[in-house]
């Protein structure tokens, strides 16, 4: 029988230890490794292609949800968290299991059993639905994570110049380069800080910190000139919003 | 409202004022107008007692209606009407009464008739003075009450902010610590027990914190050590803590729990947000015989760290310091070379203590 490959991701050593301790008695588990942050986890996931993750939410720089956003699909996820009412609501409505720290061995084994049941298929519908629910109520985003290969880039929102729609994706134009994300414009419009970001076009959200000037272009359209010299189209609706904001 | 008018202290002041006016009135009649003693007494008593009675009525009206909620125009109309009415009633009443009392004294009655215009004018003057005093007193009291309400509201707001800040970090800290203890029980029960005791001591202290009490540096540091010891168990080698405390500072007075939020901030923006090793440094030294300085520093990475969030915590502490010591600017945040330092100067005496000197 093929063993279940597991990775533990938590920034606290003792929190990892209790999980590995509980796993030690399980014959069908192959513990591939433990990671203390999202960057290492990303590399290890790409290298070992695990079946199951124990994933902490609160971690430095890249939190559990952000890791989930960028990691390749495949592994089942059991979340572990101490206290996060916002996240717990998202878990409860979806099929993903989660462990509230501290947890008992019984509760732990129950979650593990649930994961075993789902193992062959690797269904991600629950995760998708949970991600969607988290996205819907997201506001005042402080950073965006993006993946290039197995490397995670953390983009602070201050360094984002503008966000542009590209088919089913959005392209994030930042001072550190351009990154593609599988999210909607609606999500970014709501999640990015309202005081800096403004939707100037159906396909563009602009960070006003990078705006140099606005000039008339054609009937009903204007051009936003960025400090970098780039030019972006502003729709009639967007121009109205822009004028309201800048006045 | 009525009880306020009849409160003995107010009423005595009011009566005394009228007795004085009455006496002046009496002297005027006796010495300048050369009235006889009885006429002068009757005249001054009737006129002034009448106005004093009307005045109580006016007083109650001002108390009842207050100054608020009406336009200036409405107020003017009301005050002028009240004035005309009062003076009219007063004039008719007192002249009528004196006419009855001094029926046989024709010399006096003709004097009364001659001076009637002057009396009406002085009645109007009485009215103006009385209303001015009443309005000033009532509106000043309203202002004081308003100020008290605002102050109360501000204190409650600050407490709410403080509680919110506390609840941001405490539940995480508590449950994660319990999880670490749970892990320690697997193969280091001794250390687990030690941590349970530390966590209990710390939680007891932070739960009994009342907000106004004073403490000493050594007592505050004791609890900060508990907190950081627990964090060190959680984060292992990722958290390094350094203390540099001058020996004579231990008994220095400072508001209780004033440093704890700053330590929590240092942890939150230091080790919580760092993937590598992080540190916290706590220093205390005497700047002068009457000033102790505490510095709390931690490294932080400007790029990924949230700018927001730090502000409210620091502002709260700063406000609390200003309230306790009555001096602004005791707390200053310093950022240099990716190291964030909060520097606080603690004077030897709080505001209340120094007032005695």
Image (tube, grey):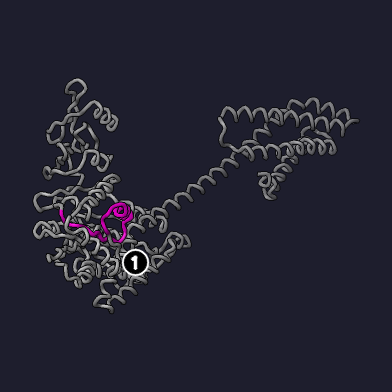
The boundaries of the magenta stretch are: A74-97
Q: Residue furthest top?
A: A219
Q: Residue at x 21, y 58 (%)?
A: A118
- State left or right for residue A244 relative to residue A229: right
Queried whether the magenta region covers residue A120, the answer comes back as: no
Magenta stretch contains residue A93: yes
Q: Residue A200 location, x and y as percent?
A: 22, 32
Residue that extends furthest to the bottom in the rendered view of this protein: B190
Tell me what residue is drawn at x 21 percent, y 32 percent. A202
**A162 vs A113: above or below:** above
Viewport quadrant of the C terminus of chain A: top left
For the point 47% across and 49% down, the residue is B153
The correct choice, above or below, for B207 with respect to B20 in the image is below
Q: Quadrant of the N terminus of chain A?
A: bottom left
Residue A99 quadrant: bottom left
Residue A102 location, x and y as percent?
A: 30, 66
Q: To which residue does mark 1 refer? A: B289
Q: Crowding at label 1, few (<14), some or many (≥20) Cα neighbours within 10 Å?
A: few
Give the letter of the chain under mark 1.
B
Q: Left or right: B198 with respect to B99?
A: left
Q: Name which quarter of the figure residue B125 lies in.
A: top right
Residue B235 in the image: x percent, y percent?
Answer: 22, 66
A224 relative position to B135: left or right: left
* Residue B298 appears in the figure: no
Q: Residue at x 43, y 66 (%)?
A: B208
Question: SS of the residue at dot 1?
Answer: loop
């Amino acid at each position: 029988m093929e063993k279940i490959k597991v990775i533990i991701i938590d920034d606290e050593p003792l929190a990892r230890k209790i999980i590995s301790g509980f796993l030690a008695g399980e014959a069908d588990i192959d513990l591939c490794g433990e990671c203390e942050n999202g960057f290492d986890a990303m590399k290890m996931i790409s290298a070992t292609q695990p079946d199951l993750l124990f994933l902490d939410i609160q971690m430095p720089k890249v939190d559990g949800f952000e890791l989930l956003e960028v990691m390749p699909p495949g592994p089942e996820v059991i979340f572990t968290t101490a206290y996060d009412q916002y996240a717990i609501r998202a878990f409860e409505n979806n099929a993903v299991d989660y462990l509230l720290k501290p947890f008992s061995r019984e509760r732990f084994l129950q979650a593990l059993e649930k994961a075993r049941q789902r193992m062959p298929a690797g269904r991600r519908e629950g995760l998708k639905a949970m991600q969607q629910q988290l996205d819907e109520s997201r506001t005042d985003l402080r950073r965006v994570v993006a993946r290039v290969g197995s490397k995670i880039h953390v983009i602070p929102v201050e360094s984002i110049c503008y966000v542009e729609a590209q088919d089913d994706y959005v392209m994030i134009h930042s001072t550190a380069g351009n990154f593609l994300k599988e999210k909607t414009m609606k999500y970014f419009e709501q999640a990015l800080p309202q005081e800096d970001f403004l939707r100037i076009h159906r396909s563009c959200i602009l960070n006003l910190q990078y705006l140099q000037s606005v000039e008339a272009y054609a009937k009903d359209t204007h051009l936003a000139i960025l400090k970098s010299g780039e030019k972006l189209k502003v729709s009639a609706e967007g121009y109205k919003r822009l004028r309201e904001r800048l006045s | 409202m009525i009880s306020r008018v009849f409160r003995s202290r107010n009423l005595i002041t009011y009566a005394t004022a009228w007795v004085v006016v009455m006496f002046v009135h009496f002297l005027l009649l006796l010495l300048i107008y050369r009235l006889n003693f009885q006429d002068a007494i009757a005249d001054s008593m009737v006129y002034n007692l009448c106005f004093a009675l009307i005045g109580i009525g006016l007083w109650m009206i001002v108390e009842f209606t207050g100054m608020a909620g009406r336009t200036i125009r409405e107020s003017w109309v009301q005050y002028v009407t009240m004035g005309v009415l009062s003076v009219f009633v007063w004039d008719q009443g007192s002249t009528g009464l004196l006419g009855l009392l001094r029926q046989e004294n024709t010399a006096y009655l003709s004097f009364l008739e001659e001076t009637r215009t002057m009396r009406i004018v002085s009645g109007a003057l009485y009215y103006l003075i009385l209303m001015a005093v009443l309005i000033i007193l009532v509106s000043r009291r309203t202002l004081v009450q308003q100020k008290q309400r605002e102050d109360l509201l501000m204190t409650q707001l600050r407490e709410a902010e403080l509680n919110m800040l506390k609840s941001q970090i405490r539940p995480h800290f508590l449950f994660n610590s319990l999880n670490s203890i749970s892990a320690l029980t697997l193969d280091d029960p001794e250390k687990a027990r030690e941590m349970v005791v530390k966590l209990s001591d710390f939680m007891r202290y932070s739960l009994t914190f009342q907000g106004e009490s004073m403490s000493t540096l050594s007592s505050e540091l004791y609890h900060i050590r508990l907190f950081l010891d627990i964090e060190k168990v959680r984060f292992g080698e990722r958290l390094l803590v350094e203390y540099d405390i001058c020996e004579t500072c231990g008994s220095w007075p400072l508001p209780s729990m004033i440093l704890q939020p700053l330590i929590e901030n240092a942890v939150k923006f230091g080790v919580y947000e760092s993937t590598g090793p992080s540190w916290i440094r706590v220093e205390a030294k005497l700047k002068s015989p009457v000033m102790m300085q505490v510095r709390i520093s931690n490294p932080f990475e400007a790029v990924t760290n949230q700018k927001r969030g730090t502000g409210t915590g620091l502002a709260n502490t700063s406000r609390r310091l200003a309230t306790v010591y009555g001096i602004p600017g005791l707390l200053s945040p310093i950022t240099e070379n990716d190291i964030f330092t909060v520097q606080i100067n603690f004077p030897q005496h709080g505001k209340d203590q120094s007032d005695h000197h």
